[in-house]
Amino acid sequence: AVLKLFCETIVASEESEKLSRLKNDLKAAIGTEGISILANLLPDFRRIIGDSSHSASRETNSIDNTGSWMQQKNRFNYIFRLLVGAITGPTKPIILFLDDLQWADAASLDLINSIIVDSEESSMLVIESYRENEVGHNDHPFSAHLRELRMTGIPLGEIKIDNMTKIDINKMLFAVIGMSDLSETELL
């Protein structure tokens, strides 16, 4: 869903000259094989490339039929890093906000880790959001992801936000409905 929205936004917002430049940048960065792989796995990617010559294969869930699963995963992560590098840069910074990562699977977290750690691009800010109370145990995939990121030496910032109290929620609700004095009304 995120890539579909990204593709729609890029196609709708980019002028034809900029879109043409982006297509050329993607083709140069990812190559024909990479474009074919992404187009097969992510059909909405074709909206940016505008190339229908890459047919979507529904026969397999793998990237292609060659190599082990680990080789295919590494190839996909590499191509995805190239994609990120092609769409970001000093004049094209990007903020990637990822919410509810306590529910992410290990493969998705591995891809995120790959983008953060192995990317040579410094024009991308990644913000990860998760519920700390749901990832407290060490064997949770997101706990392992955080440990791996901390070991890299990449500067990480953490902001902890406590749960809202009943009074905080009531203040917010009263502000939304235009009532300013909580003392006159019974709290929910």
Image: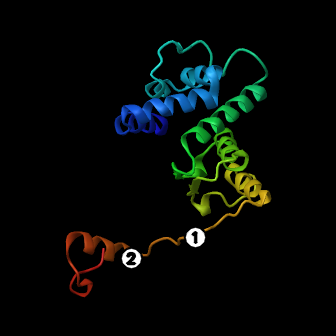
Which class describes the residues within 10 Å of circle 2: few (<14), some (14-19), or many (20+)? few
Q: In which quarter of the image is residue 58?
A: top right
Q: Quadrant of residue 81?
A: top right
Q: How many marks?
A: 2
Whichever of labels 2 and 1 marks the residue nearer the N terminus, that label is: 1
Q: Which of marks 2 and 1 is in front?
A: 1
Residue picked out by circle 2:
168
Residue picked out by circle 1:
160
Which class describes the residues within 10 Å of circle 1: few (<14), some (14-19), or many (20+)? few
User: Are circles 2 and 1 on residues that touch, CB within 8 Å?
Assistant: no
The circle drawn on residue 169 is none
Left or right: 24 as drawn, with respect to 153 = left
Looking at the rendered structure, the kind of residue marked 1 is Lys
Residue at 54%, 14% (x, y): give it. Answer: 54
Relative to 113, does residue 173 appear above or below in the rendering? below
Residue at 78%, 56% (x, y): give it. Answer: 152
Looking at the rendered structure, the kind of residue marked 2 is Asp
